[in-house]
C-alpha cells in the first residue's frame, strides 16, 4: 500500500512502479469513485488508465453514496482477482476512513432495510428514542453503553443490525478482520512541511487552470445534485460550489480550498503517524524511489 498526505506524489510513484512491475492499482480515494469529477480529484488521465489497470475509479454517479464497508468488500475482491491473474495489487490513496477500515478491519454488517427503518421511525415517533435505546440495552448492552439515548441515527442502525442479523452489533464489530494486516504500508511525505504546502498550492493552481471551476459548474447544473451529497463535500468542490452560490468571491474560494487541503494533509499525517506499521519515505531524499522499489521486490520475494 502506498499512502500519504494529499499532494505528496503518490500517483506519480505508482505510475513509475507500474511501468516496471506487473502492477494493478486499486484506488484508496473516496472522491475518485465518482464519474465527472476529474480535475478536482487529480484523477489519473485516460492514457495512464489505458496503460495500467486502475480499479475503484469512475464506478459511481456523484448522486450516489459509497461506504467504507463497500470499499473494503470491493478491495478484498479486487486483491484476490488481481493475485489470481498473477499480478501485484498496489493500493494507492489517502482517504483516512478507508485506510482505517483496511488497517483495523470493518464489521461484516447486514445491508440496511428501508422497511425496518420506517418501522423503527414510526415506533420512535410514538414511544420516543429513549424507549428504543432501552430496548437496545436489552439486546446489546455494549452498544447501548456507547450510544446516547438521544442519538436516533445510531440507535436505529444498532437495532436494525440486531433484528436483521440476529446478533448484537458489538459482537459483529469485535469479529472484524483487518484486510491490510499483511500488506506492507508505505507513507510518502516530504520531510519539510513547507515543501508539501508548496506542492499543494501548485497542484490547486494547475487544477484551476485546467477548468476546475467549469467542472463544478457542470455538476451544479444538475437538478439532482446538492451541496449535501457526499461527493460534493470533497475538498475544493465544496468551496467552489459555495462560490457559485454567491457566498464569496472566486479568490476567497481559492484560498479557502487551499486552506482546507492543507488541513486535510495535516489530518492525514496525524492519523498515519498513529499507525506503527507504516513505513515513512521522503520522496525528495536521494534515491528514495529506487530504495522503495528494491524493498518492495524483497517483500514480494518473501522469506
Image (cartoon, grey):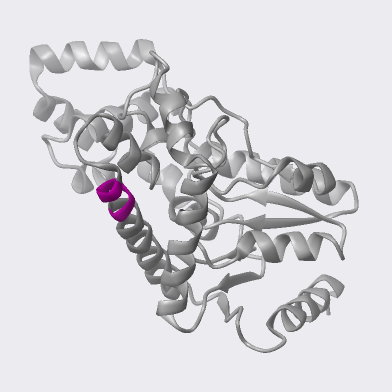
Q: Nearer the viewer, residue 31 or 200?
A: 200
- Report whether 124 appears left or right of 279: left
Q: Is residue 105 visible?
A: no
* Residue 115 part of the magenta-drawn span: no
Q: Is residue 225 visible?
A: yes
Q: Image point 25% across, 49% down: which residue?
A: 252
Q: Position of residue 238 (x, y in %)?
A: 33, 40
Quadrant placement of the N terminus: bottom right
Q: Image point 69% across, 44% down: which residue?
A: 45
Q: Image point 19% across, 10% down: which residue?
A: 122
Quadrant placement of the C terminus: bottom right
Tell me where residue 21 sits by quadrant.
bottom right
Q: Nearer the viewer, residue 244 or 297?
A: 244
- Report whether 177 appears left or right of 268: right
How many discs mark residues in the rendered view? 0
Q: Main secondary structure of the magenta part?
A: helix
Q: Which residues are magenta?
A: 251-255
Tell me where residue 154 sits by quadrant.
top left
Q: Image point 16% across, 35% down: which residue?
A: 151
Instruction: Please tell me whether residue 258 is drawn above or below residue 82 in the rendered image.
Output: below
Instruction: Please tell me whether residue 265 is drawn above or below residue 126 in the rendered image.
Output: below
**Residue placed farthest to the bottom in the image?**
286
* Residue 252 part of the magenta-drawn span: yes
- Report whether 129 appears left or right of 196: left
Instruction: Please tell me whether residue 114 is drawn above or below residue 76 in the rendered image.
Output: above
Amino acid at each position: 500500500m502506498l499512502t500519504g498526505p494529499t499532494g505528496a506524489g503518490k500517483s506519480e510513484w505508482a505510475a513509475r512502479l507500474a511501468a516496471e512491475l506487473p502492477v494493478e492499482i486499486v484506488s484508496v480515494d473516496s472522491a475518485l469513485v465518482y464519474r465527472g469529477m476529474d480535475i478536482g480529484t487529480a484523477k489519473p488521465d485516460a492514457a495512464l488508465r489505458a496503460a495500467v489497470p486502475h480499479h475503484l475509479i469512475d464506478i459511481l454517479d456523484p448522486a450516489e453514496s459509497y461506504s467504507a464497508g463497500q470499499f473494503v468488500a470491493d478491495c478484498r475482491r479486487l486483491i484476490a482477482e488481481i493475485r489470481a491473474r498473477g499480478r501485484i495489487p498496489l493500493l494507492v490513496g489517502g482517504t483516512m476512513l478507508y485506510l482505517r477500515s483496511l488497517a483495523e478491519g470493518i464489521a461484516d454488517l447486514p445491508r440496511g432495510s428501508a422497511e425496518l427503518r420506517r418501522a423503527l421511525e414510526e415506533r420512535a415517533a410514538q414511544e420516543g428514542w429513549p424507549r428504543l435505546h432501552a430496548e437496545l440495552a436489552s439486546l446489546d448492552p455494549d452498544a447501548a453503553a456507547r450510544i446516547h439515548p438521544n442519538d436516533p441515527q445510531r440507535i436505529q442502525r444498532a437495532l436494525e443490525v440486531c433484528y436483521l442479523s440476529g446478533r448484537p452489533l458489538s459482537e459483529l464489530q469485535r469479529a472484524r478482520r483487518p484486510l491490510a494486516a499483511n500488506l506492507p504500508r508505505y507513507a510518502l511525505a516530504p520531510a519539510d512541511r513547507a515543501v508539501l504546502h508548496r506542492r499543494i498550492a501548485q497542484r490547486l493552481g494547475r487544477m484551476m487552470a485546467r477548468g476546475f471551476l467549469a467542472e463544478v459548474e457542470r455538476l451544479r447544473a444538475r437538478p439532482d445534485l446538492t451541496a449535501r451529497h457526499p461527493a460534493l463535500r470533497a475538498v475544493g468542490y465544496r468551496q467552489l460550489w459555495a462560490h457559485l452560490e454567491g457566498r464569496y468571491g472566486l479568490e476567497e474560494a481559492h484560498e479557502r480550498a487551499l486552506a482546507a487541503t492543507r488541513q486535510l494533509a495535516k489530518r492525514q499525517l496525524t492519523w498515519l503517524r498513529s499507525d506503527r506499521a507504516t513505513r515513512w519515505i521522503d520522496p525528495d531524499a536521494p534515491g528514495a524511489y529506487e530504495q522503495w522499489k528494491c524493498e518492495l521486490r524483497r517483500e514480494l520475494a518473501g522469506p
